[in-house]
């Protein structure tokens, strides 16, 4: 199923938006703080912040993007195995295996941090512009 909102999308419960075809918020944020909250989803695209702080929050999802803000992959395997992570302001891969095996991690205007154990392990391309 596709979830599209003109405001925010909150997937804070365990498996709450699990295997969604896509998650899109045109004016606000997407929160995947629940365990497996947005795991195995297709595209996750928010106008502002994407929060994948739940354990396996955005695990093995398609492209995760923010048009104007941050992407947080601070949960255990928060954004691991995603197709691509593209944050406008910054990308935080500070969770244990936060962005593990994600081929492309990019921040359009600031930084990418990889402070978790294997935070950006096996990423092919990490790019931060400022």
Image (tube, grey):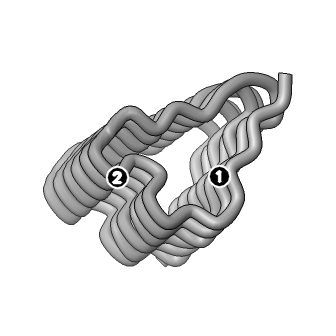
| Residue depicted at x 47% and y 69% | 101
- Residue 16 appearing in the image: yes
Q: Nearer the viewer, mark 1 or mark 2?
A: 2
| Residue depicted at x 38% and y 33% | 115
- Left or right: 12 in relation to 91: left
Query: Could you give the CA–CA distance between mark 1 and mark 2, rounded to whole angstroms?
Result: 14 Å
Residue 24, given in percent of the width and then of the height, sits at 62, 54
Residue 43, given in percent of the width and then of the height, sits at 61, 66
Residue 128, above or below 4: above
Looking at the rendered structure, the secondary structure element under dot 2 is: loop
| Residue depicted at x 34% and y 63% | 17
Front-most of residues 16 and 59: 59
Front-most of residues 101 and 33: 101
Residue 46 image-quadrant placement: top right
- Left or right: 31 in relation to 89: left
The disc at residue 105 is 1
| Residue depicted at x 62% and y 54% | 85
- Left or right: 53 in relation to 85: left
Residue indicated by mark 2: 118
- Residue 28 appearing in the image: no
The disc at residue 114 is none
Residue 62, above or below 70: below
């Amino acid at each position: 199923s596709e979830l599209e909102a003109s405001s925010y999308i909150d997937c804070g419960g365990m498996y709450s938006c699990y295997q969604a075809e896509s998650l899109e918020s045109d004016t606000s944020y997407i929160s995947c703080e629940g365990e497996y909250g947005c795991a195995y989803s297709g595209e996750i695209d928010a106008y502002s912040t994407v929060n994948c702080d739940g354990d396996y929050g955005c695990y093995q999802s398609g492209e995760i993007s923010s048009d104007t803000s941050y992407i947080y992959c601070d949960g255990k395997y928060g954004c691991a195995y995603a197709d691509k992570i593209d944050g406008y302001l910054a990308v935080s891969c500070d969770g244990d295996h936060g962005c593990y095996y994600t081929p492309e991690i990019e921040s359009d205007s600031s930084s990418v941090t990889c402070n978790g154990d294997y935070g950006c392990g096996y990423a092919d391309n990490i790019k931060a512009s400022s």
